[in-house]
Image (spheres, rainbow, N blue to C red):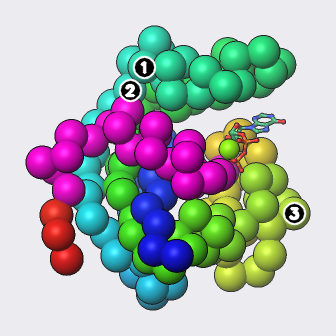
Amino acid sequence: MIQQTLSIIKPDAVQRDVCGEILKRIEAGGLKIKALKMLELSKKQAQGFYAVHQDKPFFDSLTDFMSSGPIVVSVLEGEDAVRVYRDIMGATNPAEASPGTIRKEFGLDIEKNSVHGSDSSENASTEIAYFFHALEMVDR
Ligand code: IDP
Ligand code: MG
């Protein structure tokens, strides 16, 4: 099934100038970029995005990190895009991610793991709406 998913290149990766390398892997993986922009989240906006994790011990540190610098958000589309992008990203903890995945290659630790990808089609819709207006998405 053709799906959309939300990708975020996190502050640790933007700061190290590896956005191009990461987008290259996304495109090489067969995912189409439908929308793309760079922005910086406030602490409150990061808390809103990660609200599902608000009771986790790492929530405060995670939202500090996600609001610490620019991020690059994009909408990706393709067959099984949610699973395909999670495969391209690799496991949450870079130390456990498979060779060749983005998190293995670029992730610094379990928090600063370079990329976010939605975990379901339903959550993708909510996450895409958090960042993008319909008019910011192209038909292609
Ligand atoms: P995911 O990004 O692979 O879907 P989630 O469990 O949804 O992983 O966690 C969201 C984000 O929170 C992770 O990508 C990572 O940045 C951070 N995170 C997850 N687990 C930990 C942890 O144990 N310590 C610190 N940060 C964590
Ligand atoms: Mg998640």
**What mark, if any, has residue 96 been given in the picture?**
3
Of 124 and 10, the residue lying toward us = 124
Q: Report helix, strand or loop for mark 3.
A: helix
- Write down the region rendered in magenta: 113-137
Q: How many residues crowd around disc 1 within 10 Å: few (fewer than 14), some, or many (20 or more)?
A: some
Residue 71 position, x and y percent, is: 39, 43
Instruction: State the residue lying farthest toward the front.
Output: 1
Q: Amino acid at mark 1?
A: Gln
Q: Report helix, strand or loop for mark 1.
A: helix
Residue at 65% across / 52% down in the picture?
119
Q: CA distance from mark 1 to mark 2?
A: 6 Å
Residue at 80% across / 75% down in the picture?
98
Asked if labels 3 and 2 touch by Cβ distance under 8 angstroms, the answer is: no
**What mark, if any, has residue 114 been given in the picture?**
none
Q: How many residues crowd around disc 3 within 10 Å: few (fewer than 14), some, or many (20 or more)?
A: few
Q: Is residue 30 magenta?
A: no
Residue 92 position, x and y percent, is: 76, 53
Quarter location, residue 87 = bottom right
Which badge, 2 or 3, comes first in the chain's sequence? Answer: 2
Question: Along the horizontal axis of the image, is 35 left or right of 22?
Answer: left
Residue 101 position, x and y percent, is: 67, 74
Question: If the picture is divided into quarters, which one holds ligand 1?
Answer: top right
Circle 1 residue = 45
Circle 2 residue = 41
Asked if labels 2 and 1 touch by Cβ distance under 8 angstroms, the answer is: yes
Q: Amino acid at mark 3?
A: Glu
Reply above or below: 92 against 76. Answer: above
Reply above or below: 117 against 27. Answer: above
Would residue 115 be seen by someone viewing this image from the given angle?
Answer: no
Reply above or below: 24 against 17. Answer: below
Question: Along the horizontal axis of the image, is 12 left or right of 139?
Answer: right
Of 112 and 135, the residue lying toward us = 135
